[in-house]
Image (spheres, grey):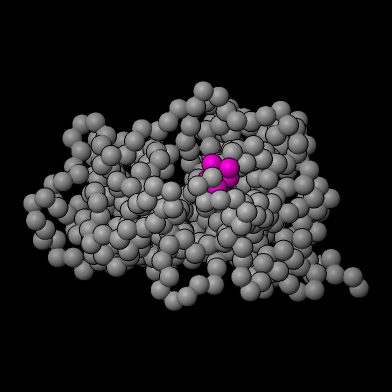
């Protein structure tokens, strides 16, 4: 809400990333890569765009373009000036941070912004200003184009994935935003177990994919949805500290809302009880662990890349969903923040990532889709189906189904 001062923002970013080594790290090494931590970022990560460009389109470009982690920091920030309020796009490489770690960095940026006195050197005040054409962070490569999408006939007909619609041959990602009210009541299962907001989001994802596929003449069999889960790490550990679990549902589960909700809660509660979550879930994790143990280092990367490309239609979940939960710590009075969204990427044939945050009175969702899966119109329609599924699940009354 309002205008963000560029000079103060750059000072705030500089102060925040000075406390986070991963935000100014770079890769080195020919075969076995390692991180090098520099005193300052290797390139300016902050840019201003004030030519009227749409903020979400800028964000899509920043998310779609690959990182060169040898030459540039794993962080990109664009301040997009708009007449009705500015948008700040903060993008980081997943090797450097997970979603919660990035939220912590953003929180510190706004805290430092409030404390900044607005006095900056001339370079900080002017560097990164765009005049005319859109300018994005230094050395950001163009979004690659693909000759054809990677969907196979098996992938489309297997019932394991989302039926593509209005897809293009462009590489990269698009985003569809959606805001929902936080459920006003506790949603309970028979026996009194409670569905958390995260459980509702995961269940709605299963239900929405099922309904989407059936609407377009395809079946939805066993669906697998990837959900991040925090790893137990030592205090002060940097980098990506998120593991993954896969939540499964069958057609019979999705035919009964209470049964589906119970199946989801069974799995999420079990995942939370685990002493430690695997870094990569399911078949992919077992294959990766076996390769690490048995394949010599110089060949390991090439073999794993080939294996993943070949097996991806079989081992990839239908979608991924990540819920950062309440982000009240990001709140600031100067500038006043109206909403916060969390976005991510998803490879094919998965193609869909749903990011969720709670900020203010709203539940803010960002549907990130690979352009090989959806076009903008299809993504908007899928978001509407998801919204309807979420509303139905919040109305579940398991206590009314308890046997007498």
- Identified at 25% across, 45% down, the residue is 47
The percent coordinates of residue 162 (x first, y second) are 67, 38
Which secondary structure type mostly characterizes the magenta part of the structure?
A: helix
* Residue 135 shows up from this direction: yes
Q: Nearer the viewer, residue 298 or 390?
A: 298
The relative height of residue 230 versus residue 211 in the rendered view (above or below) is: below
Residue 167 on image: x %, y %: 57, 28
Say above or below: 272 vs 264: below
Residue pushed farthest top?
Answer: 147
In the current view of this chain or complex, which residue is farthest to the right?
Answer: 404
Residue 214: in magenta span? no
Q: State left or right for residue 212 relative to residue 341.
A: right
Q: What is the span of residues highlighted in magenta in the rendered image?
A: 300-304
Marker count (numbered): 0
> Outermost residue, left direction?
122
Q: Is residue 398 above or below residue 149?
A: below
Q: Residue 107's image quarter?
A: bottom left
Residue 397 visible from this viewpoint? no
Nearest to the observer: residue 178 or residue 145: 145
Whole-percent x and y of residue 354? Answer: 55, 49
Q: Per the image, is 301 magenta?
A: yes
Is 93 positioned to the left or the right of 168 in the image? left
Quadrant showing the N terminus: bottom left
Q: Quadrant of the C terminus?
A: bottom right
Residue occupying image coordinates x 13% and y 46%: 126
Residue at position x 52%, y 33% in the image:
371
Left or right of residue 188: residue 98: left
Give residue 37's position: percent from left, percent from top.
30, 60
Please name the residue shown 32% across and 39% down the image.
140
């Amino acid at each position: 809400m309002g205008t963000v001062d560029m000079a103060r923002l750059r000072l705030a970013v500089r102060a925040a990333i000075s406390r986070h080594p991963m935000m100014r790290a770079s890769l080195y090494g020919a075969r076995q890569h390692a991180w090098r931590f520099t005193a300052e970022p290797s390139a300016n990560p902050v840019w201003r765009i004030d030519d009227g460009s749409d903020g979400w389109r800028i964000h899509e470009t920043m998310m779609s373009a690959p990182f060169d982690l040898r030459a540039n920091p794993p962080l990109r920030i664009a301040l997009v000036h708009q007449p009705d309020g500015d948008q700040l796009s903060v993008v980081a490489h997943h090797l450097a941070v997970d979603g919660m770690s990035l939220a912590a960095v953003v929180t510190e940026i706004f805290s430092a912004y409030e404390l900044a006195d607005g006095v900056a050197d001339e370079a900080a005040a002017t560097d990164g200003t765009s005049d005319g054409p859109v300018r994005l962070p230094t050395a950001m490569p163009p979004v690659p184009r693909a000759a054809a999408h990677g969907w196979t006939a098996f992938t489309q007909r297997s019932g394991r994935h989302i039926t593509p619609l209005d897809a293009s041959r462009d590489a990269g990602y698009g985003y569809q935003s959606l805001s929902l009210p936080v459920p006003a009541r506790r949603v309970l299962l028979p026996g009194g177990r409670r569905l958390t907001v995260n459980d509702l989001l995961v269940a709605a994802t299963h239900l929405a994919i099922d309904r989407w596929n059936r609407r377009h003449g395809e079946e939805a069999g066993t669906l697998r949805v990837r959900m991040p889960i925090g790893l137990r790490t030592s205090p002060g550990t940097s980098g990506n500290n998120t593991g993954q679990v896969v939540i499964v549902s069958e057609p019979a589960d999705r035919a009964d809302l209470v049964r589906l909700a119970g199946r989801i809660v069974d799995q999420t509660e079990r995942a939370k009880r685990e002493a430690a979550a695997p870094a990569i879930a399911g078949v992919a994790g077992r294959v990766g662990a076996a390769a690490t143990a048995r394949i010599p280092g110089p060949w390991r990367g090439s073999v794993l890349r080939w294996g993943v490309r070949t097996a991806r239609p079989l081992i990839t979940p239908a979608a991924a969903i990540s819920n950062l939960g309440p982000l009240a710590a990001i709140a600031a009075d100067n500038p006043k923040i109206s909403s916060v969204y969390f976005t991510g990427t998803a490879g094919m044939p998965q193609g869909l990532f749903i990011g969720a945050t709670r900020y203010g009175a709203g539940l803010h969702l960002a549907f990130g889709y690979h352009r090989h899966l959806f076009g903008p119109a299809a993504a908007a329609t899928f978001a509407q189906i998801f919204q309807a599924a979420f509303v139905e699940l919040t109305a579940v009354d398991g206590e009314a189904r308890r046997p007498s």
